[in-house]
Image: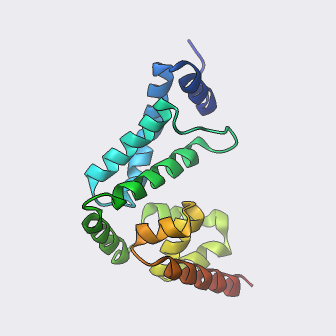
Amino acid sequence: MSEKRSDGELLRAVAADGDRRAFEELYRRYAQWLTARMRGRCADAGVVDDVVQETFLAVWRGTARYREDGDVAGWLWRIASRRLIDALRNDGARGRLRQTLARLRHRDEASAEERVLAGVEHGDLAGALVRLSPELRSVLQATVIDGLTTREAAVLLGIPPGTVKTRALRARKQLREELA
């Protein structure tokens, strides 16, 4: 019986040898998780499925390079979030984006992911994050947690880049005041 290979070993096997089994194992480990995360960002299941497929195609083709200095899940999330932004910029994306943003803006209940992020391990920060308005929290999530640039966050959230900067500043100020 063989040992379970690490994510890094799987990625090296895919990159070096085009190891199909390694790729399939990586896909089994992360495809469902990535799809669930993407659905939290985009209501259009078709777009999400395309984004997840494009993400794994980038891994398979070697166009996305893993530097082995971070978490594989985070690396895949970053690829997928950039692919989502690209997909939303294409024809017909404005309507899908408006629909997604309307759903996100009017959501009263925090998602499971948001509750986990605001969990016990962060202590006082958790409460401060929960007390932020949804507009400020969504900007922080896009720029800090998801690692998007101001411009990318603006496209995702459907607001001007200047508004992203302003909301990020307001969110940081509010967090500083509450945590001081």
Q: Nearer the viewer, residue 87 or 45?
A: 87
Residue 179 vertical position relative to residue 39 in the rendered view, above or below? below
Side of 39 where 125 appears, left or right: right
Side of 51 where 19 appears, left or right: right
The outermost residue toward the front is 91
Image coords of residue 116 (percent x, y): 53, 62
Residue 86 vertical position relative to residue 8 in the rendered view, above or below? below
Picture quadrant where residue 32 is located:
top left
Q: Nearer the viewer, residue 110 or 81?
A: 81
**Residue drawn at 48 percent across, 61 percent down:** 113
**Residue drawn at 44 percent across, 62 percent down:** 112
Image coords of residue 120 (percent x, y): 62, 65
Residue 106 vertical position relative to residue 33 in the rendered view, above or below? below
**Quarter that holds the C terminus:** bottom right
Image coords of residue 64 (percent x, y): 54, 39
Image coords of residue 130 (percent x, y): 53, 77
| Residue 53 visible at all | yes
Residue 40 vertical position relative to residue 66 in the rendered view, above or below? below
Picture quadrant where residue 148 is located:
bottom right
